[in-house]
Amino acid sequence: MAVMINMQKNGIETAVPVGFSWTTLFFGFFVPLFRGDWLWFAIMLVLAACSLGTINFLLSFFYNRIYLSNLLNKGWVPADEYSYNTLRQKGILSK
């Protein structure tokens, strides 16, 4: 089950899921397309084509973590204490 946390950058705040990605399981490469994550859209599209879509099961365990890591690398930060503690507990933030 995914937990929703809040991330912010330049005064913009967004909710981001942490944990298993049900949307990736059912919708595959469309998830990064809707989130504007073009690199992972291309990667997942190629992997889905090569594996006839079965890769979605494996990626559903990892995609939310990958997406969150990319947001952190782009300068997004946890918006509140709950979000910060959740990221630390999941091992996404070190300190």
Image: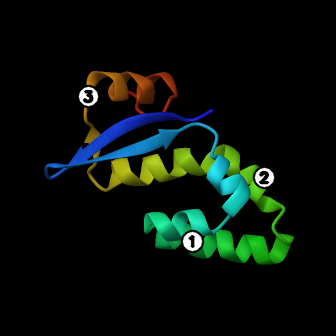
Disc 3 to disc 2, how far (Cα)? 31 Å
Q: Check disc 3: other Cα within 10 Å, few if <14, some if 14-19, many if 20+.
A: few
Q: Earlier in the sequence, mark 3 or mark 1?
A: 1
Residue at position x 58%, y 36% in the image: 19
Whether tag 1 and tag 2 are in contact, CB under 8 A, the answer is no
The residue beneath circle 3 is 80
Label for residue 61? none
Residue 14 to residue 3: above or below? below
Residue 72 to residue 46: above or below? above
| Number of numbered markers | 3
Q: Could you say which quadrant of the image residue 46 lies in? A: bottom right
Q: Position of residue 25 (x, y in %)?
A: 72, 53
Residue 3 to residue 77: above or below? above
Label for residue 41? 1
Question: Tag 3: residue type?
Answer: Asp
Q: Is residue 95 left or right of residue 31?
A: left
Q: Position of residue 32 (x, y in %)?
A: 53, 65
Most extreme residue toward the left is 11
The residue beneath circle 2 is 57
Q: Could you say which quadrant of the image residue 1 lies in? A: top right
71 and 4: which is toward the camera: 4
Disc 1 to disc 2, how far (Cα)? 16 Å
| Residue at disc 2, secondary structure | helix
Q: Check disc 2: other Cα within 10 Å, few if <14, some if 14-19, many if 20+.
A: some
Whether tag 3 and tag 2 are in contact, CB under 8 A, the answer is no
Q: Earlier in the sequence, mark 3 or mark 2?
A: 2
Q: Position of residue 23 (x, y in %)?
A: 63, 53
Question: Tag 1: residue type?
Answer: Phe
